[in-house]
Amino acid sequence: LELLRELRTPDAVAYSAAVSACGKGRQVQMALSLLHEMPAIQLAPNEITYSAAISACAQGGQWQRAEALLRVMPAEGLFANEIAFNAALHACEKGGAWEIALSLLAEM
């Protein structure tokens, strides 16, 4: 994150990488903060950023947040692709939310 802050003009790629790194470190709140910070600095999160945030939620055992992020993607003009769905399914699996997982599978 320190490197992200040192960049003169961070872009969506840098933010997506930072969100992904937070997820791998189980820093869900930080990952979500980065995602929500992007519009404030005139950056639009993309499918990769959202997928990384959904994966971070899965790593942190927060299936409800993962599903909520997946659901907001179309409203943001983004296509919820297989990567995003798989990350949300993983979150549901970790949280024992099998009914939600089945509904996600039906939507794919």
Image: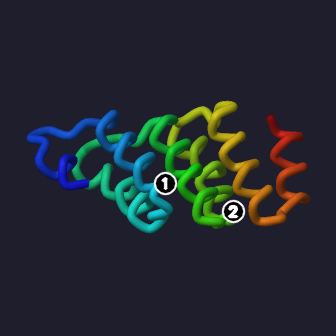
The nearer-to-camera label among 2 and 1 is 1
- Location of residue 63 by image quarter: bottom right
Q: Which numbered marker is on residue 23?
A: 1
Residue at 31% across / 50% down in the picture? 38
Quadrant (top left, top right, bottom left, bottom right) of the N terminus: bottom left
Q: How busy is the neighbourhood of tag 2: few (under 14 within 10 Å), some, or many (20 plus)?
A: many
Q: Nearer the viewer, residue 96 or 74?
A: 96
Q: How busy is the neighbourhood of tag 1: few (under 14 within 10 Å), some, or many (20 plus)?
A: many
Q: Which numbered marker is on residue 63?
A: 2
Q: Nearer the viewer, residue 40 or 8?
A: 8
Measuring from the top left, give residue 66's x and y in whole percent. Answer: 63, 57
Q: Is the image coloured rainbow, by chain, by secondary structure, or in one colour?
A: rainbow
Residue at 65% across / 66% down in the picture? 61
Marks 2 and 1 sit apart, C-alpha to C-alpha, by 13 Å
Nearer-N-terminus badge (2/1): 1
Quadrant (top left, top right, bottom left, bottom right) of the C terminus: top right
In the image, is residue 48 above or below residue 56?
A: above
Q: At numbered mark 1, what does the secondary structure look like: helix, strand or loop?
A: helix
- Location of residue 16 by image quarter: top left
Type of residue at label 2? Trp
Type of residue at label 1? Gly
Measuring from the top left, give residue 32's x and y in whole percent. Answer: 44, 60
Residue at 41% across / 49% down in the picture? 21
Q: Nearer the viewer, residue 20 or 43?
A: 20
